Amino acid sequence: MSNLYEQILKKEGKIGVIGLGYVGLPIALAFAKKVAVVGFDINAERVEMMKNHVDPSDELEASDFADSDITFTAKTEDLKDVNFFIVAVPTPIDAHNTPDLRPLIGASNTVGAVLKKGDYVVYESTVYPGCTEEDCVPVLEEKSGLKFISDFKVGYSPERINPGDKEHTITKILKVVSGCDEESLDIISDVYKIIVEPGVHKASSIKVAEAAKIIENTQRDVNIALMNELSIIFNRIGINTFEVLEAAGTKWNFLKFFPGLVGGHCIGVDPYYLTYKAEKLGVPRAYHQLWSLCQR
């Protein structure tokens, strides 16, 4: 009996992408060049645009939709034949800089309503370590009536797409993948290898993969904040910050960050997911140090 990866290759199984924003749509179309895909978004107007080969995020061209075996839909029932779900919805913060998991929980409810025995669910949304198993899996179990691991498998593979970056696209970036057990890790790895040319890095657990993603953006946010603070100091001293960085950059292990605004959808948000988790774990020093840096 063939496994899920082989079924997907033969188009006997389908991949479903939940959330068709600047992350989800490129993933859906990349897979749709190779296998059968259902692209789901709760916004029916956006779905109609994509049916007409228009990217609502204005990142992709009409030609990117060509030769794609994909069905766009806003109807949950159209996901019933999907066997491998990829959740790529936003994970914003609220007015108090607290993680807003409503889109993620909503997507989990959508998937749970159509989840079957033997299905896989992989989350790509940036979250704090533990969120997938502690917040999402219980929703899947409750909504589907199925049991985690014995009935369905879950993994986490963080998105690494930069909006507007035409070089580092989904197919060109090494993919971090994780699963709830060895079997799921192998299947999830094989599925992503269908489209990811550099291959995958197998994380030892879902929490490790979640943590890897959150520190990618936190590191960048904190280091840019540091450069901004240094720039203020150097300006008052009367020296050019970029000349200082040029000189320091001659050392082989100097990290070349520069002053400026923190760009992108996630970098200014993601550190709050980490500080939220730190506070929950009773790590106030880490919480306050990170929080103060992220404010700058």
Image (cartoon, rainbow, N blue to C red):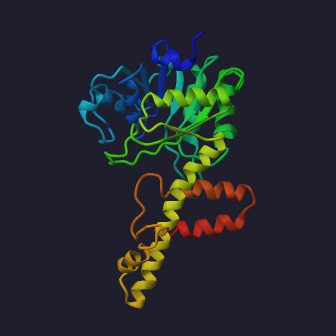
Q: Residue at x 51, y 15 (%)?
A: 7
How many numbered marks have been drawn onto this rendered protein structure? 0
Q: Residue at x 65, y 41 (%)?
A: 204
Q: Can see residue 61?
A: yes
Vertical side of 109 occupied by 35: above or below: above
Vertical side of 185 occupied by 90: above or below: below
Vertical side of 240 occupied by 173: above or below: above
Q: Is residue 8 left or right of residue 186?
A: left
Q: Position of residue 233 (x, y in %)?
A: 46, 84
Residue 142 figure quarter: top right
Q: Position of residue 153 (x, y in %)?
A: 64, 26
Q: Residue at x 42, y 45 (%)?
A: 161
Q: Residue at x 42, y 72 (%)?
A: 249
Q: Relative to the observer, which residue lies in front, 265 or 32?
A: 32
Residue 67 figure quarter: top left
Q: Is residue 240 left or right of residue 228?
A: left
